[in-house]
């Protein structure tokens, strides 16, 4: 495995983790908004 390939995959994994966090945050905010009148 080439170093730059590993770096690229690590960057992709980090971006996926960030997107997952953003998704969970948006879901939580949407749940709070829908629960409040």
Image: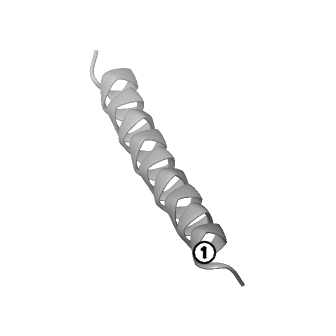
Crowd rating for badge 1 (residues with CA inside 10 Å; few <14, some 14–19, many 20+): few
Image: 31 above or below 9? above
Answer left or right for 25 relative to 2: left
Q: How is the image coloured?
A: one colour
Tell which residue pokes out farthest to the top in this image.
37
> Within the image, what quadrant is residue 30 found in?
top left
Answer left or right for 9 relative to 36: right
Looking at the rendered image, the quarter that the N terminus falls into is bottom right
Image: 30 above or below 28? above
Q: Residue 13, image x and y in percent?
A: 55, 63
Answer left or right for 14 relative to 28: right
> What residue is shown at x 42% (from left), y 50% (from top)?
18
Dot 1: element: helix
> What residue is shown at x 66% (from left), y 69% (from top)?
5
> What residue is shown at x 41% (from left), y 41% (from top)?
22
Answer left or right for 35 relative to 11: left
Image: 4 above or below 21? below
Please name whichever residue, 12 or 2, is drawn nearer the observer in this view of the structure.
2
Q: How many marks?
A: 1
Q: Residue 26, image x and y in percent?
A: 40, 33
Q: Residue 11, image x and y in percent?
A: 51, 59
Please name whichever residue, 26 or 10, is drawn nearer the observer in this view of the structure.
10
Tell which residue pokes out farthest to the right in this image.
1
Looking at the rendered image, the quarter that the C terminus falls into is top left
Tell which residue pokes out farthest to the bottom in this image.
1
> What residue is shown at x 58% (from left), y 57% (from top)?
12
The residue where tag 1 is placed is: 6
Please name whichever residue, 9 or 28, is drawn nearer the observer in this view of the structure.
9
């Amino acid at each position: 495995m080439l170093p730059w390939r590993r770096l690229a995959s690590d960057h992709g994994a980090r971006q996926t983790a960030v997107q997952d966090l953003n998704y969970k945050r948006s879901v939580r905010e949407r749940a709070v908004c829908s629960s409040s009148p």
